[in-house]
Image (cartoon, rainbow, N blue to C red):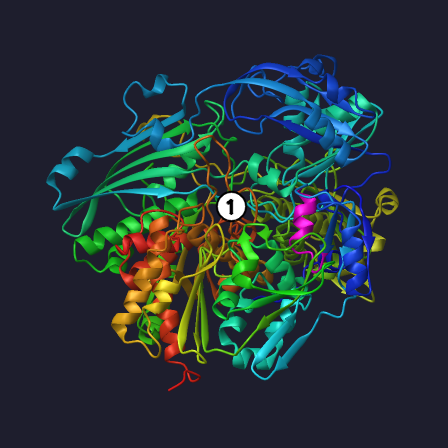
Amino acid sequence: MTAAVRPDAGLKLAGAAVFGTDLDVPGMLWAAFVPAPVAHGRIRSLDLRAARALPGVTVIGPDDLAGLVGPGERDSERTLFAEGEIVYRNQPLAVVAAPSLSEARAAVAAVKVEVDPLPIVSDLEQVFPEWPGSDADASPLIAAHVRARHGNVDVEFRKADRVVSETYRTASVHQVALEPHACVAEIRGDIWFVRTTTQSPFGVREDASSLLGWPESSIVVEGTWVGGGFGGKGACFLEPYALLLARATGRPVRLALTYSEEFRLGRTTLPAVVRMETAVTAGQIRARRVRLLLDVGTSLPGRDFATGYSIGFLLGPYRTEAFEVEGYAVRTHKPPFGPHRAPFAPQCAFVVESHLDHVARELNLDPEEFRARHHWREGDTTPLGQKVGPFGLASAFERARSTAREWRAEAPPGHGVGIGCGFWSTSTGAGGEVRLRLGPQRLVVLQGEREIGSGSVLAGLTAVAARTSGLPPERISIEYGNTAEAPFDSGVYGSRTLGALGRAIEEAVTALRRTLAQRLGARGQAELSIERDEIYAEAGERRAALVVLLTPEEDAAGGILAEGRHFAPPRTIDEKRVLSGSFYPYTDFTGAAHVAEVSVDPATGAVRVERYAAFQDAGTVVDRGSAQAQVEGGVAMGLGTALTEEAIWSDEGRLVNDGLLDYRIPTLDEIPPIAVEFIEGFAGAGPFGAKGLGEPPIVPVPATVAIATRAACGAHVTELPLSAERVARALKLL
Amino acid sequence: MASFDLVVPETAEEAIAALQTLAPGEAAPIAGGTNLLFDLEEGRIAPRRIISLRRLPWRTLDWNGGALTIGSTLPLRSLEDDPEVRRRHPGLYEAVRNVGGVALRHRATLGGNLVRSSPASDLTPMLLALDAEVDLVGPQGDRRVPLDRFLQSSRRTDLRPGELVRSVRLPEARPSAFLLQRVRPANDISQVVVAVAFASSERSWRIAVGGVPPRPTLLPEAAASLGSGRPDPAAVRRAGASAASHSALAADRRASEEYRRRVVGHLVERAVAMVSGGEGFPA
């Protein structure tokens, strides 16, 4: 394990970092949702009178919105409360505030709701026991339908030496951030002010504006310290409700989820079914057909991003002459789909790797050789027609094979060693803007993202600023500003922080160094250094303490100012290959190859991961400690997806295991020693050619464990997670 | 969580008196609190008074020849850390060390585990296989009840109003083994628990299973098929098959019925082999 000291470690160790769940403002009220009692139904009546009659209680239901929302245009499809029809269990029907949490709960219990239940769509395969037909597009159950095609698919399949077809199923997994969602809202004059635990303060502001009808300029969002996000805190969620209650009561209002609510209301990865067909001729993949049914819960039609984005991960990272791909986003009575660290990509990699391993075995080919031969390399074209940029996958795979050979030589009977691959791309998103202030003693970076625990903001950006300025890290402060103070940024998601804000810092520091060189009467960029506690600038023959180079205005402002912006590099796919729906290009190509040694109990099917190695394409490693911690964390989290994590939804649309007792993330007992090695030199879109590392390390994990399991005992499991019972079934023990 | 009075008696008599003055359900004793606090938080119970047992002199571990008496408020971690327990009751040691995590075992007690009477208890199958007896104190005096009779179903025991579990008595050290199967090896509720012991004094086997409602149970038929000494492989298989056909094995969210049967049969065979092949097995 890594031993890196984070800039925020002391604060957190001392308990001085205030997380969203810690927020406690004098005089605040406690809020709670009135949850829908069924997953689908028509509301016959919602009687809030008894709740309203309780002392100190304020209730806001659908009929109360008119007096509270603003004059602006509101999102008509996304409603704050179920209006008329309930579409998922626990959907908010109303929200209450009271002087204490127990009084708020008593008020919730006093609400009377009468519902006429309607039929519930819970299971993908119950809706579409066969593949959706040509009439499916008209179905209200289809939120998105994406199709793409290239080459002579039918001819290749007809001519093929061998066609291998399989069906895979993957489970719903939750982010399980340690800290549940929480916020405190208050009205400060004309300003709707909310402090919240979020990956995206500006995203919350934008969404709150469109839900409340008040302009963004009247809403201020201040991020707290975040106790883990993993994608689950990327969107606006509790904030509009707390703001409305604050407006209605004139008091600060706290709305926080219990951990069970976090499970029941969370937006996360839902179940999927994938059909894979591969045509092989002369040991080469000639064509592939990929079909995906993705449960997107109550995601709105036309707003599904996941299907088109993730389906690309079912095609790569393997050369394919011809392909046909079709994906349906299917609406069920569950909360909307939401991102979970590399949304759905670990599941895709599990399917692709397990399938190609199986194809090679069916053809009596060496599965690793077979995969290696088809890996994308720089200059290849992806199935969707994008040129592959610098890509370290093949190098990572080579290193993984050499480790796998060593481990195989040492492995006792009953153990198996396997390699899994995966890829991801930094999603640069909108924004990426910073303001710098270089004073006589410090370089301060003002920006709008909160550290969410990954280290990307505080450790990563500090390292970028240090490397570009030449100043030691202890001379650099990364300061957070709320949405009224900091420049715009879209948030900590998509492995983008280091890339987007890092590039902005690079630009701003370069501008600063140019300015200083000019002031020294030289060209190019000044070098910065420390002498007797002072920052010095040097260019050409001249050298001076920074303090003497400042204008009087700069002196008053505390230093010389600069701004930096990052713009995502343009990337395109070949739209001619797209038949319907949206597919997306990649900003860069980040590969990884992992090796696992597992043991399998031949009598019970229980899989234990004995040791693990990750070979991670990183472009350039900017901060080694954080980078290594990201890989270790990604592997640990992926082991949960691989082996034990499974949110179980009943036929009534109820989440059966809505707690950490029966939704099982790995404990330290199940996490083996993890060796991490970085593959550098294949440049990405970030500063110094860095690639984002938040998400890539989780992608290959379920695939790696599945392939190692097959190597250990022969069990070919086509369903995630690889529970002992599923392995036992694959071994025909049951 | 509603408010309550906390009472901390110094003696068993005071504790019983404090328990007795209120109607059942209005007063609740607390030892480690690892179950009680959940029940309070989830509103499953709402006592007016909570009686802490922490000052009672029951955190004890006493050997008397081969017999072991375990005080009901002794933290499980102390039981686990005792080298004699580990040497003379290997199965019990394994059972205890698999309960929850270390932090939980520093608080949780044997008495609390028995009174909760969970079908999924990791401890009771082993205690059943060791013919444990429960020593109770109460307003009508002390009494001793075999564990098999004390446990009834989930949250139901033979405990009478005003009574407290003082200790658990294991009459003799026995070669024993404990095995479990869980979705996640650590910190999980077991799908299946198997405990096997050989009663050297009477040369007979005990097999107990847990992890299924209504409560962990002894399987005398499966045990009888092992005979009165070291069983041959065919007898071991018969015992496994007999255990696997135990009627209470059923499906729930943790495992299917067929998987439970498969695993119970296998774990019984494995545990019997561990006991009969172990050092302490009588010739």
- Name the residue located 82 percent from the left edge and 55 percent from the top edge: B7
Q: Is residue A605 visible?
A: no
User: Within the image, what quadrant is residue B102 found in?
Assistant: bottom right
Q: Is residue A645 visible?
A: yes
User: Within the image, what quadrant is residue B261 found in?
Assistant: bottom left
* Secondary-structure class at tag 1: loop
Q: Is residue A30 magenta?
A: no
Mark 1 neighbour class, 10 Å CA radius: few under 14, some 14 to 19, many 20 or more: many
Q: Is residue B40 magenta?
A: yes
- Name the residue located 40 percent from the left edge and 25 percent from the top edge: A144
Q: Position of residue A613 (x, y in %)?
A: 44, 64
Q: How many marks?
A: 1
The chain letter for the residue carrying disc 1 is: A
Q: Position of residue A469 (x, y in %)?
A: 68, 56
- Name the residue located 28 percent from the left edge and 66 percent from the top edge: B238
Identify which residue, B41 or A587, lies in the foreground: B41
Which residues, given as a range, are shown in magenta? B30-42
Q: Position of residue A291 (x, y in %)?
A: 30, 35
- Name the residue located 61 percent from the left edge and 37 percent from the top edge: A261
Left or right: where A544 falls relative to A265: right
Q: Which residue is under mark 1? A: A341
Left or right: where A718 falls relative to A87: left
- Above or below, comparing residue A471 to residue A555 in the picture: below
Q: Amino acid at mark 1?
A: Arg
Left or right: where A364 falls relative to A48: left
